[in-house]
Amino acid sequence: MRRDKKLAIEILRTLVHDKSGTMSINTLTAKLEEKCSDSEVYYHVQLLQPVGLVEIQANGYVRVTSAGQDRAENNDKQDPMGTWADPGPS
């Protein structure tokens, strides 16, 4: 599976728009089901954790970090996903 920067940003924005910034992985996949498969969401959440944009909690919840919120709002100075391939136009 290829990394999709647009999907990663969509995941961050979905988390940011939730009042708590924390959502179960099942709720997150349900919100994005029209855009991608469950496995794509799981994969990208796993990719976002090591670069510090989300935190995966033991109870199956995903929390956006401050860096993730900045990235979702395009306020970050450094792009942790800058080396990801751009899938091109959708």
Image (spheres, rainbow, N blue to C red):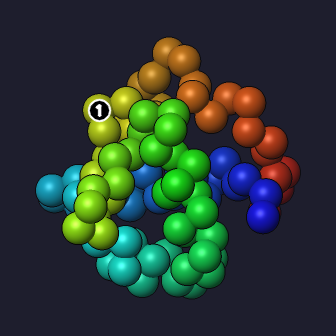
Residue 89 sits in quarter: bottom right
- Amino acid type at circle 1 is Ser
The percent position of residue 56, horizontal first and vertical second, equals 35, 54
Q: Is residue 16 above or below residue 72?
A: below
In percent of the image, x 62 and y 34: which residue is there? 81
Q: What number of labels is visible?
A: 1
Against 41, is 12 above or below? above
Q: Residue at x 33, y 78 (%)?
A: 27
Query: Which is more toward the observer, 71 or 3?
Result: 3
Note whether residue 72 is visible.
Answer: no
Residue 55 in percent (x, y) is at 34, 47
Q: Residue furthest top?
A: 77
Single out the residue that lies furthest toward the front. 58
Left or right: 23, with 78 as reference point: left
Residue at the (54%, 18%) spot, across then down: 78
Q: Is disc 1 surrounded by few (<14), some (14 to 19) or many (20+) residues within 10 Å?
A: some
Q: Residue furthest left?
A: 20
The C terminus, quarter of image:
bottom right
Q: Position of residue 31 (x, y in %)?
A: 41, 78
Q: Is residue 20 visible?
A: yes
User: Looking at the picture, does residue 43 appear above or below residue 51?
Assistant: below
Which residue is disc 1 drawn over?
66
The image quarter in which residue 28 lies:
bottom left
Q: Is residue 64 left or right of residue 81?
A: left
Q: Secondary structure at mark 1?
A: helix
